[in-house]
Amino acid sequence: MKKKYAKLGEFTTLELMAVCGARAIKNGEVVFIGTGLPMIAAMLAKRTHAPNAKIVYEAGFIDSNAIDIALSIADSRLGYRASGAIGLIETLGLMLQGGHVDVGFVGAAQIDEYGNINTTYIGPFEKPNVRLPGSGGGNDIVSSAKRIVIIMTHEKRKMVKKLDYMTSPGFINGPGAREKAGLRGGGPSLVVTNLCQMDFDQQTKRIRLAAVHPGVSVEQVLEDSGFDLIVPKEVPTTELPTYEELKLLREIDPLGIYIPRTKA
Amino acid sequence: MVEAAVEDKRITLKEAVKLVPDGAHLFWGGFGFQRPPMAFAHELVRQKKRNLTIYTCGSEMDIDILSGAYVVSHFELAFFAIEGIGLAPNIQRRIREGAIQIEDYTNLAMALRFFGGALGVPFMPLESMLGTDLLSKKKFRPKKAEVITCPFTGEKVVLVPSVRPDFSIVHVSRVDREGNAQIDGIKGEDIEGARAGKKLIVMAEEIVDTEFIRAQPDQTVIPNIYVTHVVECPWGSYPMMVYNYYDYDMEHIRMYYEQCKTEEGWQKYCNEYITSVDGHKDFLRKIGNDKLQKLKAKRPLPY
């Protein structure tokens, strides 16, 4: 069946971000996710190209097949047709640290150019301006999963040269730093924002522009980034969502809890 | 044959909370929106407990209430928020005032610290926290975590101190009078946390006959050997959820969140729903039976 792509203006940025997240999941993979956009992305992946992806929520729901949108990672909704309902030692310990998790999805309040993540403090550690929720299982996931997808909004104050606090380790300060620290997980592989997708240069481990979203210019991405971003000669445009993907997204989140139906 | 008398560990919620002295250290059960000991939190507020230290992985409105009412002075945890809505409003305010301090770990680190306490070993090893500020920065613990080189393999590993709190407080699906407990749905860190405390208080949605438990012993996740007291407490997690029993009351949670953005709003909430009611049953009466019936799980769905 030939893919039918939607046109610019027929989808929202959040829908596009969910589609990017879904496409980062391969069929059969064990996927660790939280609520919000990553949950929508994983639900979409299971309904499209990755029906055999196994979705694990750190609170203990394993291989969840939720049909209703959950607000908490411990939400009973995630128990729908799950294969197991166990606990944290099982999910974060035996499954994740045991090396069985292919990809983990996390959010971030700040990231730096090595993909290090802050979800704890904004402002100085001794007297912070805002106290954020903290690591939760974020640090565990980013430490031990084979690869990491970060989903966040693209703002200058969030894409920073120096984090206020490093909650979860990206490539720390460059090549070999994860290994030197003793980390076995693969680290960040993809950052999806409302403007673009970014990956990491193999040699330097620094963040690199991988694709700009339709209608977004490279200049706009650079303007909204507080860190130095590697820009390749040719920057592709993110593949548009298909009508099928958009239809499924609207079925997955009919009330617009995570993807508000502001405009088509 | 001599028939064993069934031991009866039941006490009331008020009696259970009276056992907790000011300054006590507590393991706090439930995870996220699932099975928080909310009724216990309310009673701690009503009895004006002070200077508690709470150990948990991730909690939400329950520990926000405890922070708002100045019950807790120290937390060791991994996560707090009102998930799906926003940051925990009272905790933000109390941090700014300097009334509470938080020592940050990860969910796995906390779960392992409870496991270590339950096992009776002084620390547990893990991979998490390596290379980050979680390892290098601390608030109030003299020692928070240490990196060592494994004496067997030479690998780097993080050690976190085990936790052996004065009390563990958990809310479960059902329990018998002797304290044999079952938990439907996810267990979070409650299996290890329940066993970490020097004393364990088990709250439950319902008390069942011990023969019900003994007909399906494979469903017991906390055997009575660990349990000090049992408290019958239906709707004990309201307005949060209990798997197979009831859904969360999002209207109430949102109202709480909006109202607690200001100190005055929080004081009003605390007075209206906690301090001016005469215990948990009176609180439920205030919420109203119509509302509660609507939240009951619509089996076969667990919510």
Image (tube, coloured by chain):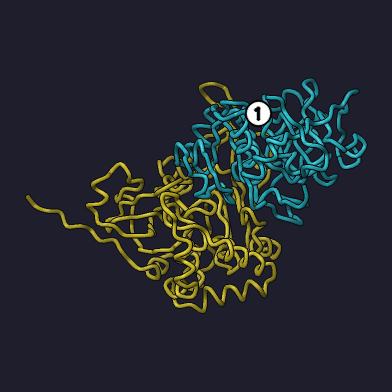
Give the x, y percent position of residue A206: 80, 28
* Left-right relation of B66 to B180: right
Helix or strand or loop: what does disc 1 sit on?
A: strand
Q: What is the crowding at mark 1: few (fewer than 14 residues within 10 Å), some, or many (at least 20)?
A: many
Residue at the outermost right position: A219
- What number of labels is visible? 1
Chain label for disc 1: A
Look at the picture and state if B227 lies above or below A10.
below
Residue at the outermost front position: A1
Give the x, y percent position of residue A15: 73, 42
Closer to the camera, A8 or A85?
A8
Q: Is residue A163 visible?
A: no
Q: Disc 1 residue type?
A: Arg
Give the x, y percent position of residue B68: 61, 67
* Quarter where residue A162 is shown: top right
Give the x, y percent position of residue A203: 79, 20
Closer to the camera, B49 or A222?
A222
Q: Colour of chain A?
A: cyan
* Left-right relation of A231 to A176: right
* Quarter where residue A237 is shown: top right
* Left-right relation of B253 to A212: left
- Residue hosting label 1: A147
Closer to the camera, A41 or A252?
A252
Q: Is residue A33 visible?
A: yes
Look at the picture and state if A202 lies above or below A9.
above
Q: Colour of chain B?
A: yellow
Closer to the camera, B173 or A243?
A243
* Left-right relation of B252 to A17: left
Residue located at (59% from left, 62% from top): B64
